[in-house]
Image (cartoon, rainbow, N blue to C red):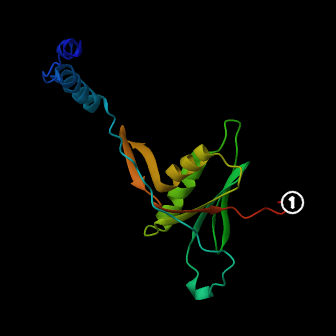
Amino acid sequence: MIRSRKRGRHFNHETAELNITAFMNLMVILVPFLLITAVFSRLAILQLNLPGSSTEPVDPQDQTFQLEVTVRSDKIEVGDRNQGRLGVYPNSVDGYNYDALSQKLTVIKKGYPTKTDAAILLESDIPYDVLVQVMDRVRVSVSVEEEEIVRKDLFPDISIGDAPVLDGGA
């Protein structure tokens, strides 16, 4: 009886075949599809600086023009850190007056053609979209001349900081 049990156990010693054809077909289709549909994005980075403190003492002979654009919830102010305000542009019904800001910055650029830096000072509750709009107006002037769009650099070296807090009555 012992012998019959041993005879009944026949082991199949065939080697198992690994069939990867279906997997290779999948990879041949999937890899090109993923490469074709991949979105290759380009990141645009602006170099920003922090403005210096406006409370630092400055010698009168060292006072150069330092453009500051202050964005408040109800207006945009353009000024020189040493001389004061050069223009105030209150909000209209549609929002901030970006066109008046662009015109003023173009006039300032004509007066200071070698000046490339400007500071944008923001109140704490200003939306990010407003910051981007103001940065675009400070960096580049866009105009239409002879049916062509002309872009001119204004103040591409931008610094960002906090706007000075207004006293209650200002």
Q: Position of residue 63 (x, y in %)?
A: 59, 81
Residue appearing at x 40%, y 50% in the figure: 44
Looking at the rendered structure, the secondary structure element under dot 1 is loop
Q: Position of residue 18 (x, y in %)?
A: 17, 24
Along the viewing direction, whichever of 113 and 32 lies nearer the viewer: 32
Quadrant including the C terminus: bottom right
Is residue 135 toward the left or the right of residue 82 in the image? left
Q: Residues within 10 Å of mark 1 (few under 14, many from 20)?
A: few
All told, the count of numbered labels is: 1
Location of residue 26 with respect to 50 vertically, above or below: above
What kind of residue is marked 1?
Gly
Residue appearing at x 72%, y 49% in the figure: 73
Residue appearing at x 20%, y 17% in the figure: 6
Residue appearing at x 39%, y 48% in the figure: 43
Is residue 146 toward the left or the right of residue 170 in the image? left
Q: Position of residue 137 (x, y in %)?
A: 52, 51
Quadrant including the N terminus: top left
Seen as rendered, the residue at the extreme right is: 169
Along the viewing direction, whichever of 127 and 3 lies nearer the viewer: 3
Seen as rendered, the residue at the extreme front is: 1
Residue topped by disc 1: 168
Q: Position of residue 29 (x, y in %)?
A: 21, 23
Location of residue 98 with respect to 108 vertically, above or below: above
Is residue 106 toward the left or the right of residue 54 in the image? left
